[in-house]
Structures are given as structure tokens and as C-alpha cells.
Image (cartoon, helix red, strand yellow):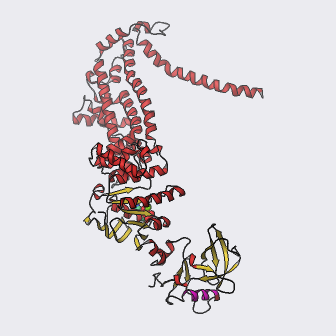
């Protein structure tokens, strides 16, 4: 009896402990990335390793910018991520809207084909992608990164589901009777109502592009055109890796995502509440 | 302004014919009701007038101009949907002014027109709210307001009251009637509810399986239904349809009932229709013998379900409340009012 009460009381604490340890394990590498970004290579490899922030950040940054065109790479990362997010939102919302509310020939077949592309393992695309980009003369150009993924099957599927669930056909017809053309219906009715889904898809797309390593590896040749993951990887070598500089670069690379997350979580929540109308 | 003429209108989806040739003229300022059982094609026809469905064959004329190929917004029709279809991301005022905005009306004039429509529908305090902050009845009024603001030639309603509770429905019915008188605009109103049809319509078109069974004023349809379908669809409880008794071996009560019913009308009818309120109870000794199978006491009237020897269906009689001997199982005597008997031929058509 008393054993049981004790067990009941202990259970939440055990859960907290478990979650806490898990969180520590997850966050530790993150923390050490920031710490090591402020130490020189020798300090990082001393025993014990530094546990708190040092004062070598600017030195690391100097090394970083000497070894690679870091700010350029950062710029390309941002450019590609923004372009691919914008294009994905445009094409996926259009495609999802059409698949959800329009009737046209071969609709089922076309949607099936779009979905089937989800089944292709991504490594199967690597060589064809390279060959196509090569033929188009897009090697070493950012558009080779944001054009191929501009209408992702996943995005179209997400949008279609959201439109089907939250935009009744009557609404579209009411707008048509009110004098909206097809473009007007899309921009004035569909897009505003899609806001929460656009936020989610935008976030997913931006992060995926920001973290994309394989894509640039295939189509980018010159270091000035590298995006950040590739550029930072090029700092590593079997000998002589500037770990401090690498960590500084990585730390800077995570900042946009952190900012984006802080901004969008608030926007997403408000978007969800204004969108959830019956 | 506001004449809608349908000439041989048809609609087919792939292989199914949904609308099978409708000829109908809605007069200027008229309140026309399309009524019929669910699935008979009323909504489809309304949506063809609105321009939301293509017309397979036939001509649609609005104010004498062929409108088959006009864009919905150019036809001068405004529609009120069953689901209200208010734009969730716009306020009441924005919802109501949207069509004007699309038509390029300046902001100031728009606000003025929205304000006037809001006044007519007593929506003043709600203009700043979003649809999710409104009750069902308020949403309904906003949807009507949105239609009014456009000053259409014709209003199209598709079962606008069916999402409201009973009390609200009665109120909105009255309000719609008032609105029609105030605006004097042509209205076409679709419903499956015959009470709505009877109370609202100047004229009613009764639909069945894609064609019009009868077109006429409410009381005309009620008192002189052109065929047994209309007779059965209009009126509750349902009209009594009594078969002609067989030449030999008819039950005495059945034969007596038939003789009483046909005393004023043609005798070559195959069936006689008689409304429940015209089937009276007679003092003992007179009339036709019947047994009460079920008695429904509604307070003001009682509905009796009666079994008459030889008649296959139960007959309905609407009688005064609190009459003696009106419980299930009791025997009564019936006195039909033959002046109201409606003779139908073997094909179910009224014999004039
Ligand atoms: N897009 C469509 N494809 C095929 N049949 C349809 C379509 N829309 C409606 N129908 C059919 O047309 C008939 C009439 O529908 P509707 O006009 O909605 O009836 P009502 O409004 O009178 O209840 C129904 O039998 C329905 O199944
Ligand atoms: Mg309908």
C-alpha cells in the first residue's frame, strides 16, 4: 500500500529525470559548438577540454574568412533558401488548390504520379540531376539548387490536404459570383486561408534548403559558389583542421534558423488561430 | 429588371440526365420557389442560373438576354448558399463589400452601400466582427446582406434556412418575406420543405426527377394538385388516395366510401384524393365505419390514422382536438366532404 503511494509519487520525478538527461545529451553538442567557437585549436584539444566560453572568437572568424569565402557562402545559402521557399510556396499552393478543388481530365492519374515521386529514393536522383544540370549548363549556378525542388510532391500533398479540409467549394463559388477571376480567387481567398499551412511548409522548406549538403555537393564546383554546409565541410581535412574556425562558422550558420524559429513559432500560432474558422 | 426565362433547359453529367427539359418563366419581382424531394435537381438548376454549372442544352434568358455563356458575376444574380459561405478571413463589412470591391466601386461608396444593407438587416453592430464570432442566424443574415449589397436583378437561395433551428427558421422566413416586399426584387428559392414553399412563394414549381410536375400559386397546388405526385408532396399529413373498389367483391365500407366521394365528381376516376381536413367524423349511425389505428394529439388538432375495411392504406383525418372516442382501437364513423374530392385517372393525372 505505502509502497504503491511512494511509487506514484516518484513516477513523475523519474520521468522528469529521464527527459532532463535526454535533453542534456541532445543539447551538449550544441553547447560545445558555441563554446569551442571561442577557443583556439590547442585549447580545444587540451585535457580537460574547455567547458566555458573563451575569447578567441574573432581570431577564429579571421581564420575562417581566410580559408573560405565565408560571407559569400552564407549569402548563397540565404539566397537559395529564400528562393526555394518562395517558389515552393507558390507552386505547391497552386498545385494543391488545383488538385483539391478543380475537376479536370486525368486528375487522379496526375496526382498519383506526383505522389509516386515520393517513393523514389533520393540517391537515385543524384546522377540524373547532375546530368540534367550539366546539359542545361546550370552547374555552379544557384538555380540548379532551387529550381528542381520548386514543386515538391510533399508540399503539393500537404497543401491539397489542407485545402480539402479547410476551404469549402462554396467559398470558391461565392467568390466567383462576387466577380473574382481565377487569379483573384487564388490571391484573395485561397492564399489568405492557407496561411497556417504556408507557414509550416515554408519553415520546412527553408530548413531543408539551409541544411542541404548533397544537393550543392552534386552541382557546385567552385568554392565561391558553395553553400554553407559544403563550405564548412571543405575546412575539414585529415590533418590540420581548424576546429575553432569550423565551430565558429557552424555557430553562425545555426543563427538564422534560431531566429527563424523564434519568429515563426509566434506567427504560426497566430496564423493557426485566425485560420481555424468554421 | 429581373425576368428569368428557362427554355428547354437540360443538364447531363456523363451518362446521367439530371435536368430533363425545364420550361419556366420567372416574372419580374416574383418570389418563385423550387420545391421537390432531395436529389431531384433543384440545386443543379439554380446553379445553372447562377452560372456555377454549365447548361447542357436549352436557353437561359435574363431580362431577355441569353445568359448561357455569361460569367456568373455578369448575370446580375446573387446567391445565398446553404452553408452561408462567408469568407472566414474577412469581417462582416468586408464580406458584404467584397463584390463591390471586385467591381471597382470606390471605398466611400462601398461603405455607404454596406451600411445601408446592414441597416435593412439590422446588422449594424456586427460589421466589425469575423464570421466565427457570429451565431448561425447572424451568419445567415450576413449572407443575405452580402447578396443585397450587390443590388442584383435576381436573388438565388439554395435551402438557406436548413442549417437553422426550428424557431429561428420561422423568424427568418418572416424576415425573407418582409425583405422581398421591401426590395421588390425577383427571388428564386430552392427548398425541400413544403411549408417554406407554401409560406414564401408567389408561385411554386414542384420538381420530380429533373422535371417540373406542376407550376402554380401555393393554394392552387394545394387545392388542385395536377397529379398524384404533387398531391402527395404538398400538404402534411399526406393526402388520402383511395383506390376504386373492384367491380365485384368489394368491401362494404370501401364501396360506401367510394360512392360518397364520387357523388360530386366524375365517376371514371381510378383514384380519389382527399385532404385529411376534409375527412370528418360523423355522429353514430351515419357515415362509413372505420377503426382508429393511431391517434396523434397535437393540442390544437388531432391526427387520426384510420383503417377502413377494404382500403389498403391507412387514411388520415385531421379533426378537432378533445373530441370524444378518439383513441387507438376505437370505432368511428367517417363523413368525407365530397366537394373537395380530387379525381385522378389511371396515369395519376387530375381529371378536370
Ligand atoms: N457533379 C455531378 N456529377 C454527377 N451527378 C451529379 C453531380 N452533381 C449532382 N449530381 C446528381 O444530380 C442530381 C440532382 O442533384 P441536386 O441538384 O443537388 O439535387 P437537389 O438539390 O434537388 O437535392 C442528384 O441525383 C445528384 O446525384
Ligand atoms: Mg440541393
Residue at 70% over, 28% down? A8
Of residue A103 and residue A42, the one placed in the foreground of this image is A103
**Percent position (x, y) of residue A59?**
35, 8
The one nearer the camera, B296 or A87, is: B296
B270, above or below A209, in the image: below
Toward the bottom, the furthest residue is: B248
Q: Position of residue B339 (x, y in %)?
A: 52, 84
Q: x, y percentage for residue B325?
A: 70, 76
* Magenta stretch holds residue B254: yes
Query: On the picture, is B311 further left or further right than B47?
Result: right
Task: Decide: is A60 above or below B146.
Answer: above
Specify start and end residues of the magenta stretch as a single range. Answer: B253-261
Q: Quadrant of the N terminus of chain A?
A: top right
- Toward the viewer: B39 or A45? B39
Q: At x 60% / y 78%, what residue is drawn?
A: B313
Give the residue displayed 40% in from the left and 35% down from the top. Answer: A199
Prevailing secondary structure class for the magenta stretch in the rendered image: helix
Q: Nearer the viewer, residue B40 or A147?
A: B40
Residue A170 visible in the displayed image: no
The magenta stretch spans residue A142: no
Amino acid at each position: 500500500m505505502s509502497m504503491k503511494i511512494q511509487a506514484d509519487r516518484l513516477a513523475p520525478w523519474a520521468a522528469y529525470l529521464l527527459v532532463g538527461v535526454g535533453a542534456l545529451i541532445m543539447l551538449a553538442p550544441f553547447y560545445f559548438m558555441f563554446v569551442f567557437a571561442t577557443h583556439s585549436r590547442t585549447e580545444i584539444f587540451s585535457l580537460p577540454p574547455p567547458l566555458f566560453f573563451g575569447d578567441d572568437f574573432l581570431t577564429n572568424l579571421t581564420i575562417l574568412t581566410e580559408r573560405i569565402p565565408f560571407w559569400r557562402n552564407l549569402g548563397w545559402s540565404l539566397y537559395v533558401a529564400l528562393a526555394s521557399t518562395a517558389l515552393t510556396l507558390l507552386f505547391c499552393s497552386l498545385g494543391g488548390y488545383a488538385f483539391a478543388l478543380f475537376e479536370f481530365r486525368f486528375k487522379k492519374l496526375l496526382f498519383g504520379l506526383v505522389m509516386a515521386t515520393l517513393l523514389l529514393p533520393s540517391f537515385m536522383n543524384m546522377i540524373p540531376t547532375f546530368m540534367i544540370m550539366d546539359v542545361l549548363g546550370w552547374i555552379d549556378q544557384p538555380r540548379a539548387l532551387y529550381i528542381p525542388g520548386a514543386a515538391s510532391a510533399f508540399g503539393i500533398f500537404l497543401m491539397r490536404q489542407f485545402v480539402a479540409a479547410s476551404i469549402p467549394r462554396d467559398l470558391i463559388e461565392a467568390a466567383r459570383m462576387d466577380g473574382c477571376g481565377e487569379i483573384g480567387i487564388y490571391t484573395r481567398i485561397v492564399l489568405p486561408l492557407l496561411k497556417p499551412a504556408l507557414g509550416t511548409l515554408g519553415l520546412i522548406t527553408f530548413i531543408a534548403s539551409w541544411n542541404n549538403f548533397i544537393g550543392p555537393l552534386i552541382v557546385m564546383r567552385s568554392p565561391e559558389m558553395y553553400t554553407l554546409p559544403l563550405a564548412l565541410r571543405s575546412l575539414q581535412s585529415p590533418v590540420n583542421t581548424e576546429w575553432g574556425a569550423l565551430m565558429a562558422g557552424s555557430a553562425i550558420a545555426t543563427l538564422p534558423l534560431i531566429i527563424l524559429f523564434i519568429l515563426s513559432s509566434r506567427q504560426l500560432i497566430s496564423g493557426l488561430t485566425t485560420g481555424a474558422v468554421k | 429588371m429581373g425576368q428569368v426565362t428557362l427554355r428547354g433547359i437540360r443538364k447531363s453529367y456523363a451518362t446521367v440526365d439530371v435536368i430533363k427539359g425545364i420550361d419556366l418563366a420567372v416574372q419580374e419581382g416574383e418570389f418563385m420557389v423550387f420545391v421537390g424531394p432531395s436529389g431531384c435537381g433543384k440545386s443543379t438548376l439554380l446553379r445553372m442560373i447562377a452560372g456555377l454549372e454549365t447548361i447542357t442544352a436549352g436557353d437561359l434568358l435574363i431580362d431577355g438576354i441569353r445568359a448561357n455563356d455569361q460569367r456568373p458575376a455578369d448575370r446580375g444574380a446573387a446567391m445565398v448558399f446553404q452553408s452561408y459561405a462567408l469568407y472566414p478571413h474577412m469581417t462582416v463589412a468586408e464580406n458584404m463589400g467584397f463584390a463591390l470591391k471586385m467591381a471597382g466601386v470606390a471605398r466611400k461608396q462601398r461603405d455607404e452601400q454596406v451600411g445601408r444593407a446592414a441597416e435593412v438587416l439590422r446588422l449594424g453592430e456586427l460589421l466589425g466582427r469575423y464570421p466565427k464570432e457570429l451565431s448561425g442566424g447572424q451568419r445567415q443574415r450576413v449572407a443575405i446582406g452580402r447578396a443585397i449589397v450587390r443590388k442584383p436583378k435576381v436573388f438565388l437561395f439554395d435551402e438557406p434556412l436548413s442549417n437553422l433551428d426550428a424557431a429561428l427558421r420561422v423568424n427568418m422566413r418572416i424576415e425573407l418575406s418582409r425583405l422581398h416586399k421591401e426590395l421588390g426584387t425577383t427571388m428564386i428559392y430552392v427548398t425541400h420543405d413544403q411549408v417554406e414553399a407554401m409560406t414564401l412563394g408567389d408561385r411554386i414549381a414542384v420538381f420530380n426527377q429533373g422535371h417540373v410536375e406542376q407550376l402554380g400559386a401555393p393554394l392552387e397546388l394545394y387545392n388542385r394538385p395536377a397529379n398524384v405526385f404533387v398531391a402527395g408532396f404538398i400538404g402534411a399529413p399526406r393526402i388520402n388516395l383511395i383506390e376504386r373498389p373492384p367491380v365485384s367483391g368489394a368491401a362494404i365500407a370501401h364501396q360506401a366510401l367510394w360512392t360518397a366521394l364520387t357523388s360530386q365528381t366524375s365517376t371514371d376516376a381510378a383514384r380519389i384524393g382527399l385532404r385529411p381536413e376534409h375527412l370528418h367524423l360523423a355522429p353514430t349511425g351515419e357515415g362509413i365505419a372505420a377503426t382508429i389505428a393511431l391517434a396523434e394529439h397535437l393540442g390544437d388538432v388531432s391526427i387520426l390514422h384510420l383503417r377502413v375495411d377494404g382500403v389498403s392504406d391507412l387514411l388520415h383525418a385531421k379533426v378537432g382536438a378533445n373530441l370524444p372516442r378518439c383513441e387507438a382501437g376505437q370505432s368511428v364513423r367517417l363523413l368525407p366532404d365530397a366537394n373537395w374530392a380530387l379525381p385522378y385517372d389511371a396515369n395519376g393525372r387530375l381529371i378536370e
